[in-house]
Image: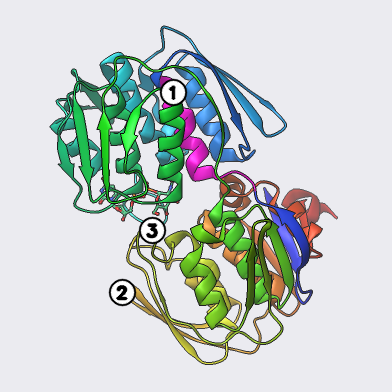
């Protein structure tokens, strides 16, 4: 087991380059299943979730390889159709291979993803949409068994699910006729997927808006693409800069993908400077309390809620955070309270009374983003914070400790075994 040892009190200063978005790269990898050939993906983050998707593709018969941050994927003519439980349980986003496999093979067997630490994470919208397109879906000993030719149709999503929008969009590219997805998710990663699919020969209009129209084509071809910058990694680093009262430029970050986050940080007292080079944040005072509400994009991202809670915990005044996307996403609050934060949760609301100081403590990361939030809390806390559960942080952040060290943070990664022996 490994842990981070963070000594707080140093403002983050300097500049780092934004990496490609995990939540886009994973789906582009799944989309490559739609056509045989050689794919080249630039700016792919080297993180555990990407390795899991590589393993899924390899089980299906593809070859994948990394050269720095460029990934090459070779998809053969004959691919498998099963995504096994040992991989899907490591990363529930593996469910996005369902649409491409069904569209390409006419059959797919994908392990049912379970819940996770942030919520039950249902997939009913993925399945209902595919059924409307003509798929027959059965359940067999923990697996989804899907088959049937797909045809175009109108699908109105009850909720703008990120994953369901992507699964249905990919399935529709090879369906017969036109599919219209209403109440679609509008995230930048969905627009990125549409650019990728279009360069494969798909016909897609409206991605990034609530109505996406996909005209099915006979076949697609392999392509080359650079992944959109990761707004969540960039947002995490900018919030870390604000919490430590530092000055950080995230090169390549796109301000237009972080609108509401940057406006909340400005409300908290930060100077936010957005240029074509990236986004710079300078904070010279204690943050002011800010209320925020998570909502599907372009609302405040649920994936930045834990990090923003840390800012509020160190703010002057009382903030109210409302979580509307995942029901268990306040689970990490108890860890933050152990560091001295004053937070009371009531259902999907949290009341945060800002304090002048947090104290270092041993804490455990319960999920990817809460893990990053606890690291940020450690960077600002008095004394030393030991964070375990790094397997979660590694799923979403490439060498988080190196990125933060570059910005002047005191953070070491060490094996707990070694630490105990020392
Ligand atoms: C994606 C992101 C995740 C982000 C989330 C919301 C990836 C790999 N993950 O997850 O980081 O936090 O979007 O922006 O891209 N829901 C249903 N039925 C469904 C699908 C979803 O009820 O069929 C519910 C979920 O339980 C959840 C909410 O809708 O409460 C949001 O889920 P969704 O937008 O689908 O998130 P993911 O695609 O899983």
Q: Main secondary structure of the magenta part?
A: helix
- Mark before the other along the chain sequence, 2 or 1: 1
Determine which quarter of the picture holds residue 283.
bottom right
The region drawn magenta spans 19-33
Disc 2 vs disc 1: which is toward the camera? 1
Q: Looking at the picture, does residue 285 appear above or below residue 404?
A: below
Mark 2 residue element: loop
Determine which quarter of the picture holds residue 138.
top left
Q: Position of residue 225 (x, y in %)?
A: 55, 31
Mark 3 residue element: loop
Mark 1 residue element: loop
Q: Are marks 2 and 3 in contact (CB under 8 Å)?
A: no
* Disc number for residue 297: 3
Q: Is residue 49 left or right of residue 160?
A: right
* Disc number for residue 410: none
Q: CA distance from mark 2 to mark 1?
A: 44 Å
Q: Mark 1 highlights which residue?
A: 200
Q: Mark 2 highlights which residue?
A: 347
Q: Looking at the picture, does residue 62 appear above or below residue 252?
A: above
117 or 416, nearer to the observer: 117
Q: CA distance from mark 3 to mark 1?
A: 26 Å
């Amino acid at each position: 087991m490994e842990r981070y040892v963070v000594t707080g009190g140093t403002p983050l200063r300097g500049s780092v380059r934004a990496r490609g978005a995990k939540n886009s790269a994973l789906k582009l990898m799944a989309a490559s299943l739609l056509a045989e050939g050689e794919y080249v993906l630039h700016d792919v983050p080297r993180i555990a979730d990407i390795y899991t998707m590589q393993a899924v593709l390899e089980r299906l018969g593809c070859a994948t390889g990394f050269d720095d941050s460029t990934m090459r994927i070779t998809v053969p003519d004959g691919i498998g159709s099963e995504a096994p439980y040992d991989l899907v349980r490591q990363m529930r986003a593996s469910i996005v291979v369902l649409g491409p496999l069904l569209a390409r093979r006419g059959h797919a067997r994908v392990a049912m993803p379970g819940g996770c630490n942030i919520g039950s994470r249902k997939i009913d919208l993925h399945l209902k949409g595919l059924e409307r397109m003509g798929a027959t879906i059965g359940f067999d000993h923990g697996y989804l068994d899907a088959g049937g030719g797909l045809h175009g149709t109108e699908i109105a999503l009850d909720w703008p699910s990120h994953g369901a929008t992507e699964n249905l969009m990919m399935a529709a590219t090879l369906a017969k006729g036109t599919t219209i997805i209403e109440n679609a998710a509008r995230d930048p990663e969905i627009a990125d997927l549409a650019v990728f699919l279009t360069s494969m020969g798909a016909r897609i209009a409206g991605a990034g808006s609530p109505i996406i129209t996909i005209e099915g084509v006979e076949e697609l071809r392999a392509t080359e693409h650079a992944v959109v910058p990761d707004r969540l990694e960039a947002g995490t680093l900018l919030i870390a800069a604000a919490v430590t009262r530092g000055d950080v430029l995230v090169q390549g970050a796109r301000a237009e993908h972080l609108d509401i986050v940057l406006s909340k940080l400005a409300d908290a007292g930060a100077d936010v400077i957005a240029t074509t080079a990236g986004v710079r944040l300078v904070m010279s005072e204690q943050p002011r309390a800010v209320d925020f509400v998570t909502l599907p994009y372009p609302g405040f991202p649920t994936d930045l809620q834990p990090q923003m809670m840390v800012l509020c915990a160190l703010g002057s005044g009382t903030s109210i955070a409302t979580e509307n996307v995942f029901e268990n996403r306040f689970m990490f609050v108890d860890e933050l309270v152990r560091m001295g934060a004053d937070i009371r949760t009531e259902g999907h609301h949290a009341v945060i009374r800002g304090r002048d100081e947090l104290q270092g403590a041993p804490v455990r990361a319960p999920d990817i983003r809460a893990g990053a939030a606890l690291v940020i809390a450690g960077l600002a806390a008095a004394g030393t914070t030991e964070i375990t559960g790094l397997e979660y942080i590694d799923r979403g952040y490439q060498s988080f400790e190196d990125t933060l060290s570059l910005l002047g943070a005191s953070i070491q990664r060490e094996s707990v075994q070694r630490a105990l022996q020392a």
